[in-house]
Amino acid sequence: MFYIKRGNVPNKRHTQFKKENGKLYFEEHISREGFSSIYSNVYHEKMPTEILSVGNFNQFNITESFGKHKNRHFFTKKLNLSGDCVNARQPLLYNDDIIIYKLHANKDMDYAYRNSHFDELFYIQSGNGCFKSNFGHINIKTGDYLVIPRGVIWKMDLDTDLSCLLLESSAPIETPNRYRNKFGQLMEHSPFCERDIAVPDLDPIELSQNVHLKVRLKKGIQEYILKNSPFDIIGWDGCYYPWKLNINDFEPITGSIHQPPPVHQTFQSAGFVVCSFVSRMFDYHPESIPAPYPHSNVDSDEVIFYSMGDFMSRNGVEEQSISFHPAGIPHGPHPGRYEGSIGKKRTEELAVMVDTFKPLKVASGLKEIEDEKYSLSWLT
Ligand SMILES: [Fe+2]
């Protein structure tokens, strides 16, 4: 990430920073990898460490559905979910590196939330809202990827209902290494650059007290009451903060013959990659076959969320469908889609792919939304 500054900060870090009344602001240093990676320094009106009470610990367990190994298809639009951006989530697929959820939120959060053990990536399928955090706010809209590093304290206010694909990651979610130069800047061949990335705008200091905070841990959520609002920030600077990128600002890379999925890569993490399939011109070699070849990506499980349009290689998928193709068997275009793509000039589609490097487990509770015929749908 790149350096930014918001609001007022002292000229030198870790020095006296005084209010008009002569009293001190309180500096909080927020860093990754034990003071050895990216960091920001934020400046509080009041001491951020005062805890009034330690509340309940609410356990959170995902249970596995022990089904057969097969290609799967879920109609996630059918999920009947209600609540705010934390409690209206349905886990779908997971392993030690990632939990993939669908989220249908229809309520504002009346508490602050801090994910302590996972970085988060929201893909906003539809809806508008305001993400408010201890770094300021980011207005979100359809097509946004919102990256929330662990430790950011936030809440979400909705303008409309939100439908999202949501990832919790055990490792940071970053822009791909190969798109960055040795100074971290996104290079000329990257499908997006810093200008496409939106960062928080700082809000006026919030001085409320007795603030309810929920801290997400691996096994559940710990509740706290803080004496002071974590949003009492006068300024901050650094390279650690939440940010967003709209999928429609991802400029597709095309070629004369079929380009492999890595050209669509948008994010990297230790255990998975995220790719964006956006509307684009098809391959232009006179003998090209625009649809993908059948493939066995032997080290990955593949998840595709079909966001909008007509996905070029699949029959029977709807908006908000999710396909899951585990390693162990090949997959590819549906009957007719391979040959049928020849001569086509472009595709109008929007899809998000998550390829994991460890096998995924299927969460329980998805029977109602599963397409039971999917695994045999390649038969001619
Ligand atoms: Fe694939």
Image (cartoon, rainbow, N blue to C red):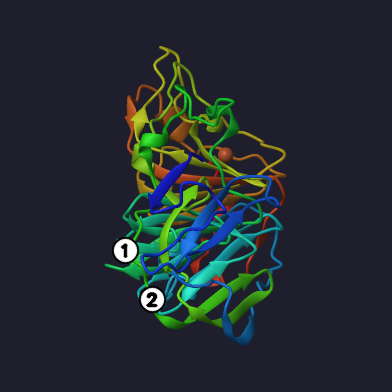
Image quadrant where residue 345 sits: top left
In the rendered image, the vertical position of residue 79 relative to residue 56, given as above or below:
above
In the image, 305 versus 29, the foreground residue is 29
Residue 93 locus on image (x, y percent): 61, 60
| Disc nearer the start of the sequence (2/1) | 1
Circle 1: residue type: Gly
Image quadrant where residue 170 sits: bottom right
**Residue 320's disc number:** none
In the rendered image, the vertical position of residue 125 relative to residue 217, given as above or below:
above
In the rendered image, the vertical position of residue 170 relative to residue 266, given as above or below:
below
Can residue 316 be seen in this snapshot?
Answer: no
Classify the position of ligand 1 by quadrant: top left, top right, bottom left or bottom right. top right
| Residue ranking furthest to the left | 159
Can residue 350 be seen in this snapshot?
Answer: yes
In the image, 130 versus 224, the foreground residue is 224
Q: In this view, does 235 lie to the left or right of 113?
A: left
Q: Mark 1 points at which residue?
A: 129
In the image, 310 versus 231, the foreground residue is 231
Circle 2: residue type: Leu
